[in-house]
Image (cartoon, rainbow, N blue to C red):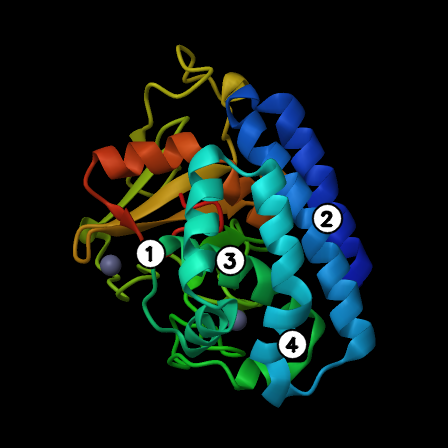
Amino acid sequence: MAVTLTANDVWAERRRRVAELRARQGFARQLLDFYGALLAVQEKAFQEAAAASPAAADLASYVAEVVVPSVVDVSLFAGPDRLRSEVIHRLETEHPLGMIERWIAGDEQPIVDRYLARAAVGPVLEALGAEARARCGGPRDARHCPACGGPPQLSYSASPMDDLATGPRFLACARCAASWGYPRLTCAGCGEDSSARLQIFSEHGTTSGERGSVVRGLPGDGAARRKDAVFPHMRIEACESCRRYILGIDLATDPAAVPLVDEMAAVPLDLYARERGFSKITTNLMGF
Ligand SMILES: [Zn+2]
Ligand SMILES: [Zn+2]
């Protein structure tokens, strides 16, 4: 049975998971501290946008005026050194409104612009309704968000129904955080569904019935035993056809996981996939 979370629960769940992973994954502590600080800014932006309810046509100007200043502040205060200097440099040469408009349109943009735009637009799109999402650019096909046209950030499977071995699979949007159903064993980047062209890498080896390899050299490695795995609920879903990958989170294995947060903190899996020549379909907010 599906459990519907209210909007406030969603933010509380993200905060809870950041604290859990921060305690468990020492290697990701700095990243999670920064993300936790950013999350507080985003939650406030979400609540303010829900209350102010700006018109969909004013999305970009509202975000640039109301949200970007606090995203800049927290980035300068809590962000990594390199991000800080890039943010300062970019804001000397460009007004954030253009960055916001390009992210909403789905255009290519420099990494730092994308970061600022994405961090600021995300909570507002989550707060506003379908009309604001509908104004965003991007294809409305199986591999893009049906609400806003954004690309998939991650893949997750829900807890299995009683009579199924595995639960349904979803992709989650990088722009508005909405989810949509997507077939299993199909590349989220190009639609490849030939199992010979798809590769699954997970820390504890092959999942039954699917091809897979053990991810070695991860923190806490030296034990392919499942109980010692750092990411027992996660896997790299890679495709030989487009040479891209997406991280998948299995909520049946770890019901406490929050896909958005777990994906962000799984840097060793990203490094492993990259070493094998795969690039991520969409890099996450933290740039991995
Ligand atoms: Zn979306
Ligand atoms: Zn592919």
Image side of residue 274 versus residue 60, left or right? left
Nearer the viewer's eye, disc 1 or disc 2? 2
Residue assigned mark 2: 40
Q: Is mark 2 within 8 Å of ligand 1?
A: no
For image coordinates 24% across by 53% down, the residue present is 195
The first of marks 1 and 2 along the sequence is 2
**Amino acid type of disc 1?**
Ile
Residue assigned mark 4: 62
**Amino acid type of disc 2?**
Ala
**Amino acid type of disc 3?**
Leu
Nearer the viewer's eye, disc 1 or disc 3? 3
User: How far apart are the alpha carbons under marks 2 and 4?
Assistant: 19 Å
Residue assigned mark 1: 281
For image coordinates 73% across by 64% down, the residue present is 46
For image coordinates 42% across by 78% down, the residue present is 105
The first of marks 1 and 4 along the sequence is 4
